[in-house]
Image (spheres, rainbow, N blue to C red):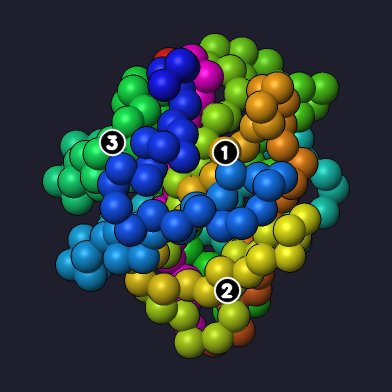
Amino acid sequence: MEHPGESSAARLAQYGGVQRLPYPRIELFQRRDFLDHMLCRQLIALIEQGRRPSTLADHNGDNYFRTSETCDLPEGEPAVQALEALLFDLNGIDPAHGEPVQGQRYDVGQEFKPHNDWFNPHGQDWEKYCGVSGQRTWTFMIYLNDVEAGGATRFTAVKKSFQPEAGKLLCWNNRTAELAGNVNAIHHGMKVRKGVKYIITKWYREKPWG
């Protein structure tokens, strides 16, 4: 691996059970049963303890663009440490390049409209969010529970949807081969219709997290 903030298809395939989706415009992968149900339950409990309204960088004026709740999970928690160890075994990315693990909770009617995880270099908050650690490289997202209805993650550019499934991991490269933000990584956390959705998100950066 050339850059410490990067993973690769070859590295992910070494883990076993990782499936690359057949879309040439985006490096997109899934792995079922990445987390066991006990660890999922432990992480859900931490999200419930710390949840707060989610926010946006470069707010676009739509107050309903992201309506979920969010929390940063304490790095000293055993469940978080177990998760971090599993992610490192999978992706091989230097942990220093990782943002704190974030949990999200979506109640009925809540969503995150189509967005990219990478930051707009021309956005008003670029320096605030990227001045130290640079652009986001990879996203690793894990569903922590099954959802009764709704709550899919839809990659709108490639027209692929993933249904919530406890323990299932999705991951993707946020950049192109030229290291620009990949517009084909745009995705929609769709509205939950029945039940509650819990997910974990781990983002990595070009430079060590500061």
Q: Which residue is mark 3?
A: 88
Magenta residue check for 9: no
SS class, disc 3 = helix
Figure quadrant of residue 175:
top right
Mark 1 vs mark 3: which is more N-terminal? 3
Q: Is residue 97 depicted above or below 105 in this figure?
A: above
**Other residues around mark 1 within 10 Å, as few (<14) / some (14–19) / many (≥20):** many
Q: Which residues are magenta?
A: 195-207
Residue type at the position of mark 1? Asn
Examine the rendered structure and indicate whether residue 85 appears above or below residue 192.
above
Indicate which label's residue lies in the foreground, 2 or 3: 3
Structural distance between the alpha carbons of marks 1 and 2 = 22 Å
Q: Please report the residue visible at 37 percent of the width from the left and 36 percent of the height from the top.
A: 11
**Quarter of the rendering containing residue 179:** top right
The residue sitting at 71% across, 45% down in the picture is 25
Measure how far apart labels 1 and 3 are at the Cα level: 16 Å
Kindly identify which numbered label has been placed on residue 151: 2
Q: Residue at x 68, y 16 (%)?
A: 127
- Give the class, few, some or many, for how many residues have Cα within 10 Å of label 2's Cα (few <14, many ≥20): many
Image coords of residue 4 (percent x, y)? 41, 18
